[in-house]
Image (cartoon, grey):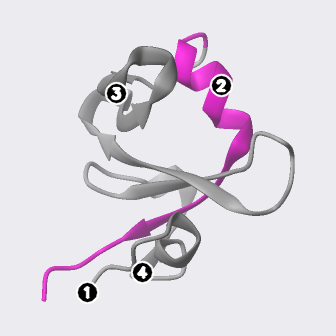
Amino acid sequence: VVPRDASQQALFGDAVALDAVGAGDLLFFRSESGGDAITHVAFAADGGMLVHSTIACGGVVCEPFTAGSRAGEALRPRLVSARRFAAR
């Protein structure tokens, strides 16, 4: 069972190097306030895309996670780690 909270999910599954992230991997982000707490999680998708829920876009979206994109600018500096959850 996958834990409910992002901070707990960040410890679950297998660690993935940030330069080896693939579609389906989970990306974990620290707080906007600059603390170390993990407060946001997103799925990596093919083609440099990110699937996540965001108030700024009104719910769940698939958007670019590249330099210069909204998500890239807002989230990339807060990216902490990535995990891969294997099917059991």
**Residue under circle 1?**
1
Q: Position of residue 81 (x, y in %)?
A: 60, 61
**Amino acid type assigned to the residue bearing label 4 in the image:** Asp
In the image, what residue occupies the spot 59% across and 18% down?
A: 67
**Amino acid type assigned to the residue bearing label 3 in the image:** Gly
**Amino acid type assigned to the residue bearing label 1 in the image:** Val
Image quarter of the N terminus: bottom left
Q: Is residue 87 visible?
A: yes
Alpha carbon distance from label 4 to label 1: 14 Å
For marks 2 and 1 on the same chain, the one whose residue lies earlier in the sequence: 1
**Residue under circle 3?**
59
In the image, what residue occupies the spot 66% across and 20% down?
A: 73
Label 2 vs label 4, nearer the camera: 2
Q: Which residues are magenta?
A: 68-88
Query: Residue 14 got which mark?
Result: 4
User: Of residues 4 and 38, which is closer to you in this image?
Assistant: 4
Label 4 vs label 1, nearer the camera: 1
For marks 4 and 3 on the same chain, the one whose residue lies earlier in the sequence: 4
Alpha carbon distance from label 4 to label 3: 28 Å
For marks 2 and 4 on the same chain, the one whose residue lies earlier in the sequence: 4
Q: For residue 13, which quarter of the picture?
A: bottom left
Q: Position of residue 24 (x, y in %)?
A: 26, 54
For marks 3 and 2 on the same chain, the one whose residue lies earlier in the sequence: 3
